[in-house]
Amino acid sequence: MNAKTHSSSGSSVQQNESNIHRFTHKAMATIFELVFTDNSQADAQWLSDEAFHDIDQLEQKLSYFIPHSEVAQFNQAGISPLRLSPETFECISLAKQFAIESYGAFDPMVGTKLRDRTPWDSEEETPRGGLPIENIDNPIYGDIELIQLHEESLQIIKLNEDVKIDLGGIGKGYAIDHIRSYLEEMGQIEQAMINAGQSTMFAMGQPENEQGWLMRFLDPRNEVDLLGTCKIKDLAISSSSCVEQDHIINPKTGKSSSNWLGSWVISPSAAQADALSTAFTVMELDEIVSFCNKNQNIATVLLSSKNNKLEITTLGPLSDYSCQWTLDAINMN
């Protein structure tokens, strides 16, 4: 599992606190928060209770650690097909999609490899599975190619009985998307913030008299110093950083490495933002630029340090989000 930082991005609501209803719930080893600005206390309480119940049900299906979860059943199973719930099937499908699109920088197998202490292929920095990094015609790394998904039957098949998955790098984002869909289906919500541990959030609508929800970019080294702000609506934002030396594992090498102090991704999907913010942390700038050019609805902020001076690189449509920066060194691509 690619580790995530907490509080690298935050939200604030510029509105009278008497009009704001906040509800929190512990699940998936973090604290989920729902913030409503346009509902009565009673409606907001009922909606949050139902949403948190859904998260608990998702955790029972997606958790690596719960013995009876569908993920645990898959990890313990042999090569026979296993039928999944629609939610688990969709989350694994997204994880595989993001692994392919990021050329293996996002890998739902990394956590299981570390827990099982399974060594990488060799001491050299070559991708697991023996696929060269420059092989763009077959850009699937590690064990992800050993998972087959059959949408019509909702079945998953492993081609090697040792294959295991861990959805920790995408599960919280997927849960946020699940809550958002539920709130949209209820038709009672126009303004809400869905937050998982301050590292991944989705902004529904915008507070009254505002262009969007105010998001803060904080220095991941102390999670206090303000680097900048932006305002988003109907979008997700997720952050990842490498403050500790072994915080981020590069799936292609199996070693602790990071090209950036921090990365933030803004996307229409919280699951995608969750996965990509970690993937981008270990990707080179030209790889990230190439990805963003192909996915122009993705905006990215990358934090680096050169000559003991912080530098921010921005990619994608950040100009649409009223960004303001406190640093002098800003590279806009």
Image (cartoon, rainbow, N blue to C red):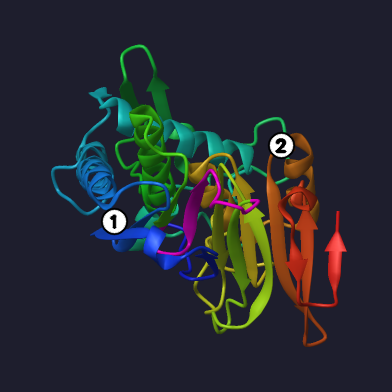
- Tell me which residue sits at (26%, 44%) in the image: 43
Q: Is residue 64 above or below residue 157?
A: below
Q: Circle 2 sits in a helix, a strand or a loop, which is it?
A: loop
- The answer to whether residue 280 is seen in the rendering is no
Magenta part of the chain: 196-211
Side (left or right) of 266 relative to 169: right
Q: Earlier in the sequence, mark 2 or mark 1?
A: 1
Side (left or right) of 229 relative to 79: right
Question: In this orientation, which residue lies closer to the viewer: 222 or 47?
Answer: 47
Distance between the alpha carbons at the discs numbered 2 and 1? 29 Å
Which residue does the numbered mark 1 point to in the structure image? 28
- Tell me which residue sits at (20%, 38%) in the image: 73
Is residue 123 within the magenta segment? no
| Identity of the residue furthest to the left in this view | 68
**Residue 112 badge:** none
Is residue 202 within the magenta segment? yes
* Image location of residue 256, percent across then percent down: 55, 70
Amino acid marked by disc 2: Asn
Which residue does the numbered mark 2 point to in the structure image? 295
State which quadrant residue 47 falls in: top left
Q: Residues within 10 Å of mark 2 (few under 14, many from 20)?
A: few
- Tell me which residue sits at (22%, 54%) in the image: 65
